[in-house]
């Protein structure tokens, strides 16, 4: 007589695999979203540091410094940033998420970040990670010493 699995045993295995897949797939998707948020947040922090370092070394900010920032270039290549004059918009899955702007005046230069209306989970995660209370960041003026 041949030894083989019964139909009931095979059905139980398929049901167990289905339950495991139902639990594991959402966890994997959440991990991927967390990785995207982490990568974009790190690029934003790097971009702010590059702008601050440039302003400190030059004593001023150029109109198009956001375009010259290495982190901005990387984010633009990845589709996470659109650039304008003295302004950048961070995108999360194609939706506007965070506006970054260098505000210039005769005596001060400030790096300002503001949140756009959140439209997806990645944007929500990104906005929860960024400390908006750190902005505006003084780049030049009476409160900044070189």
Image (tube, grey):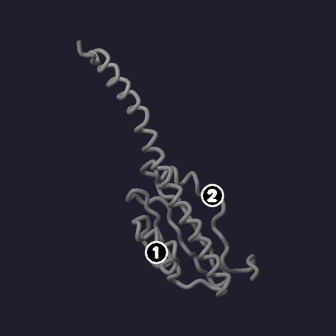
Question: How many other residues sit within 10 Å of disc 2, few (<14), some (14-19) or many (≥20)?
Answer: few
Task: Provide the secondary structure element on which disc 1 rests.
Answer: helix
Give the number of callouts: 2
Tag on residue 73?
1
Q: Nearer the viewer, residue 85 or 22?
A: 22
What residue is at 46 percent from the left and 79 percent from the top? 85
Q: CA–CA distance between discs 2 and 1?
A: 22 Å
Place of residue 72 in the rendered image (x, y in percent of width and height, measured from the top left):
49, 73
Place of residue 25 in the rendered image (x, y in percent of width and height, measured from the top left):
40, 38
Considering only vertical position in the picture, is 39 above or below 109? above
Quarter of image, res 77: bottom left
What residue is at 66 percent from the left and 63 percent from the top? 134
Report the mark closest to the observer, 2 or 1. Answer: 1
Place of residue 131 in the rendered image (x, y in percent of width and height, measured from the top left):
62, 57
Q: Which of 45 and 25 is in front in this view?
A: 25
Relative to 46, is 73 on the left or the right?
A: left
What residue is at 64 percent from the left and 78 percent from the top? 53
The residue carrying mark 2 is: 131
What residue is at 64 percent from the left and 81 percent from the top? 55
Considering only vertical position in the picture, is 63 above or below 13? below
In the rendered image, the quadrant that contains the C terminus is bottom right
Place of residue 140 in the rendered image (x, y in percent of width and height, measured from the top left):
67, 80
- Find the residue positioned furthest to the bottom: 58
Considering only vertical position in the picture, is 92 above or below 140? above
């Amino acid at each position: 007589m041949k030894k083989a699995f019964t139909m009931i045993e095979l059905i139980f295995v398929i049901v167990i695999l289905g339950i495991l897949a139902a639990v594991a797939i959402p966890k994997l998707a959440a991990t991927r979203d967390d990785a995207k948020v982490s990568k974009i947040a790190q690029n934003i922090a790097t971009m702010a540091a590059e702008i601050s370092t440039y302003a400190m070394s030059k004593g001023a900010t150029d109109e198009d410094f956001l375009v010259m920032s290495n982190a901005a270039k990387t984010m633009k290549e990845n589709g996470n940033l659109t650039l304008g004059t003295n302004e950048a918009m961070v995108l999360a899955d194609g939706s506007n998420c965070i506006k970054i702007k260098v505000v210039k005046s005769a005596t001060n230069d400030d790096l300002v970040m503001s949140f756009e209306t959140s439209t997806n989970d990645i944007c929500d995660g990104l906005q929860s990670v960024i400390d908006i209370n750190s902005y505006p960041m003084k780049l030049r003026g009476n409160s900044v010493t070189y």
